[in-house]
Amino acid sequence: FSLSLRPLLFLSLPPSPSLSFSPYLSRVLGLLGQCTKVVKRFDIMDHTATLTKYVFFRKAISRSGLQHLAPVHKPMPPIANGPSKEIRTSVDWTETAVNGDHLWLETSCSGELCYLGEDTCVLKTAKSAPRRKCAACKIVVHTACIEQLDKINFRCKPTFREGGSRCLRDNMLRHHWVHRRRQEGKCRQCGKSFQQKFFHSKEIVAISCSWCKQAFHNKVTCFQLHHIEEPCSLGAHAGVIVPPSWIIKVRKPQSSFKNSTRRKKRTSFKRRTSKKGTDESKWRPFMLKPLPSPLMKPVLVFVNPKSGGNQGTKVLQMFMWILNPRQVFDLSQGGLRELYRKVPNLRILACGGDGTVGWILSALDELGMTPHPPVAVLPLGTGNDLARTLNWGGGYTDEPVSKVLCQVEDGSVVQLDRWNLQVERSPAQPEEGTQKLPLNVFNNYFSLGFDAHVTLEFHESREANPEKFNSRFRNKMFYAGAAFSDFLQRSSRDLSKHVRVVCDGTDLTPKIQEQKFQCIVFLNIPRYCAGTMPWGNTGDHRDFEPQRHDDGCIEVIGFTLSSLAALQVGGHGERLHQCREVTLTTFKTIAVQVDGEPCRLAPSTLRISLRNQANMVQKSKRRTSVPLLNDPHAVPERLRLRVNRISLQDYDRLQFDKERLRDISIAVGIVVVRGDCDLETCRLYIDRLQEVRTHTDECRGLPRPGSAHRLSPNWSFLDSTSVERFYRIDKAQEHLHYVTEICQEEVFILDHDGLAAGPATGMPDLVVEPNSGVCSCVCVFRGDTALHKAAYQKHHAVCRLLMDSGASLIKTNFKGKTPVEQALNAGDQELASYLTSKQLPTTVSHEDLETAV
């Protein structure tokens, strides 16, 4: 009896004595009871079947890696000098790669307990010992305890499969279950939230999968035995994840002694043997066998860790946690893998600045991938003009990367023109300068003159003293100082005398010399110089077509110093030409820049011609149209929203506590908008709310509200619909989001410059006409009606909505100006003509809707 029961006593028992409700303990005790009954009945056959079931259960536990907290029979010797095994920090693509290797990164979370627990950890008393965190499965262990993970056979989630494994069961992807002492979200089984501890607790509260992110309570009623062996679906991002079954590790071919003997006897095998030797020289450790599916859009992520300060490193870790680490690449350690050359429906996400995007597009040209996989952009740089053009915004804030992956998957594919730059040395006398440009292909722009000279000075100073340029604020201050110094020296004042520009056979030199341009830009995309629009976005110029980045034409623009300064306030340069080919001749050494890379170019002749068109991913709106009337989820016609302000200090301190942030938020006012209003339009209403409130306080005799009660010009919307926390929305992406997507009854805004304060007094309402959705306030600031303000700011869409709601065109402000005169003063002839055509007698009956104060 004792001999037959002994094998059952050495099974993997519960993780910890404190976990009395562990599923494994309950299973083991239950099966032990069954075995006792079996022995009492002397039913040897049933006892053998039960023992077989137990052995299967033990193997399942071993494969899942959940036996790592089992009681240790023999204490393991402590390690004093750290692990002797090399700590891997990046993915191994060599023939020595081991499936399930952890990717250890340095972490500052010294307060977290070691994953091994008290029974296995070799540094139980060393609370301040250095720790490492795995980027793929998010476990934290002491650096000295890394070797213990191998001894207890706890591996990371698999990233490939062995080539010799032909069994379908071995190639099936299973869950990678990991114990968690902290877990966000709710249990998959019971739907209840996980208990969160204020301090780091030793108790294991959840068991979650590193692939699909399913999480269960560490209870027998929630996590059951069948969860261990069931296949994993890869979760919500299964359509963009490269499954480990696609990536195969190939064994290196070896020539056997038998083949070598045959080569000596038979000459007919010489050709075959030499061919095999050629294959061995081209052998690679990994190969890819994708399974094409219209629902699969695998995404390769390339991260430039140098972009955006420390943002690149954090983004790299977040993508390794969600995706297969073998589809996430650090550009500082390697480039594009030829392994993914023939993957169907492949998409690429470039995390960095515009230079990172250009490097990736050039790498795709070198690999000869046809067609080019579409490239999306996660802006981590400073300018990000290409990212702004494709609706990805001017910079990454703290948006969840899971949301970014959904946007990459759902984005539309557009074309981007790319241009060749060919340089021929001038036969003139040699001067100082280079004959080679930093880049021979550009995607954004090529410029020469004042802006290139300032960029070159900044670049040379940073190369000479890199330690002085470790702050973005210092960089901006130096850039401004260099621009002012160049302005005083007037180094580019004679640019027009030393260049000759021919566009599609048309010589533009006389016009350039007449206008005395100090900067010439050849622009491919609408954005330039961190978001400005030098070509202009109005239709007042009838000689040219609207600017596009896929029409095969390049725009030539000339700037004086005054027009360059006006760019930052909505101005534009002098439109010179739209052409398909440019010949530029310089007669002296001139500063030029190619997509932000400057140099001094010696006298030469440059030819700009179309190279090709690259596929890019453009971010699109989630909801492209308003639902039908019979739709149960239809958007209401009007929304009454309470506007609440949160200071930047409170947001940084309590960003993970949504309820606390709601409580300390300050009420600004109430706005009423249309149900299909986007954030860009809602921003106009909120700004208008501030003006109305200021005038209301003045009418009541109250003092002018201070900075604590007013919004600063620098504020952004917050997405309050997420479960975990509030997320900032980039201002450049506000036209892509609807109000109903980020809030319900209250809209929260983040004031970057404001101070934390108590609730504000006085909450004026912005009354919106039901049929127009236009703000029509009774109290108007400085005698200007809403139409006066919209005409002066050249908001065509707002003016049309105001006219449809019956706004008055004959009402004057304190200066005696009508809305038509305001449009003329703003220089918008097209808007003035439109308002003049709408000046009918019927509008007088609606004059009472707007009253100038």
Image (cartoon, grey):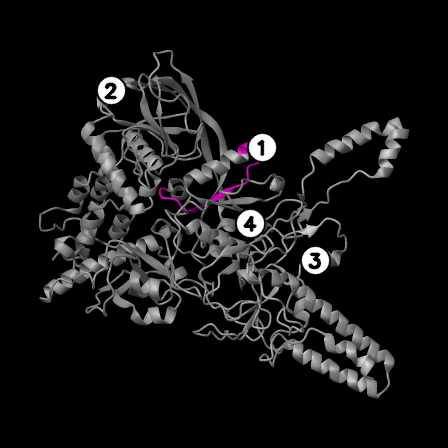
- Report the residue that reaches farthest toward the bottom: 40
Residue 781 place in picture, x, y as percent: 15, 56
* Residue type at tag 1: Gly
Relative horizontal placement of residue 411, taking residue 91 as reference (left or right): left
Which residue is identified by label 3? Answer: 172
- Report the residue that reaches farthest toward the right: 265
Relative horizontal placement of residue 731, taking residue 200 as reference (left or right): left
Q: Which numbered disc, 2 or 1, marks the residue that appears first in the sequence?
A: 1
Which stretch is magenta? 365-383
Mark 2 falls on what kind of element? helix
* Front-lying residue, 801 or 124: 124
* Residue type at tag 4: Ser
Which residue is identified by label 4? Answer: 90
**Disc 3 crowd, CA 10 A, few/some/many (<14, 14-19, 20+):** some
Would you say the residues marked 4 and 1 are in contact, meaning their CB atoms lie under 8 Å apart? no
Q: Which numbered disc, 4 or 3, marks the residue that appears first in the sequence?
A: 4
The residue at the point 70 percent across, 38 percent down is 283
- The image quadrant that residue 669 belongs to is bottom left
Q: Is residue 824 magenta?
A: no
Residue 398 place in picture, x, y as percent: 40, 56
Which residue is identified by label 1? Answer: 368
Q: Is residue 366 magenta?
A: yes
**Quadrant where the N terminus is found in the figure:** bottom right
Q: CA distance from mark 1 to mark 3?
A: 33 Å
Residue 652 place in picture, x, y as percent: 34, 62
Q: CA distance from mark 2 to mark 1?
A: 43 Å
Relative horizontal placement of residue 401, taking residue 520 as reference (left or right): right
**Disc 4 crowd, CA 10 A, few/some/many (<14, 14-19, 20+):** some
Q: Which numbered disc, 3 or 2, marks the residue that appears first in the sequence?
A: 3
Mark 1 falls on what kind of element? loop
